[in-house]
Amino acid sequence: MKKDLVVAVRMTMVTLVLTGLAYPLIVTAVAQVVFPWRANGSVVSADGRVVGSELIGQGFKSPAYFQPRPSAAGADGYDAAASSGSNLGPTSRKLRDRVAADVARLRAENPQAPARVPVELVTTSASGLDPHLSPAAAQWQVARVAGARGVTVGDVRALVDARTEPRTFGLLGEPRVNVLRLNLDLDLRFGRPAGRS
């Protein structure tokens, strides 16, 4: 029995060292060499400070910025530590009321936009932290952003077009616009609006 116990302890220690230490260190080293930007969280900087990650959505409330999808992650949304969907289904009164309120708010904030609000501007993603919008949802907001910044609709529309990412490898997913990158492009091109958020 003592011999079996010694063998079991040795195997446990070997497995712990291989899978708990060696493997993670090797994978981390390879990731740092092969794609360090992605391995470090795809951090986005502006003016010498970190402003977010290209992979994690964040809220923008100012009319001078494009707004992302709503978030159910955390009490106030966009909480990366509480990433999740709302788990509310189509029969949920709470979901219907929230969507109706969001549609009314978006129509009031975007009076020059087409009457039909893009569905992704009123529905949360599974993670609650989706950093992208469809080009159509971004274009829907162009008139509001241009008006708040005092620039032409054409100039803002051109930024959306330039920031639109194609399908991955030409066939996976849909064309998309990274909201954080697009809003940083706005500041770079037109300057920061007063009281930005």
Image (cartoon, rainbow, N blue to C red):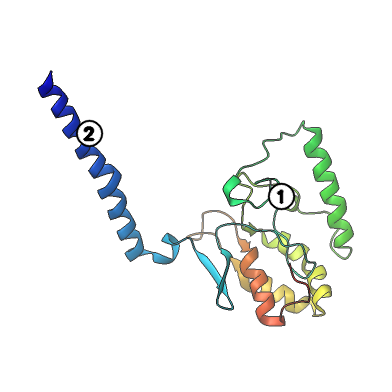
**Sequence-wise, which precedes: disc 1 or disc 2?**
2
Say if 5 sits above or below 36 in the image.
above
Q: Mark 1: which secondary structure? A: loop
Determine the residue positioned at 74% across, 65% down: 139
Q: Amino acid at mark 2?
A: Thr
Q: Which residue is mark 2?
A: 12
Q: Residue at x 68, y 39 (%)?
A: 86
Q: Is the residue marked by circle 1 packed among few (<14), some (14-19), or many (20+) residues within 10 Å?
A: few
User: Residue 111 at x, y = what percent?
Assistant: 89, 63
| Total marks placed | 2
Q: Residue furthest front?
A: 2
Q: Which mark is residue 76?
A: 1
Q: Residue furthest left?
A: 3
Q: Is residue 158 visible?
A: yes
Q: Secondary structure at mark 2?
A: helix
Which picture quadrant has residue 100?
top right
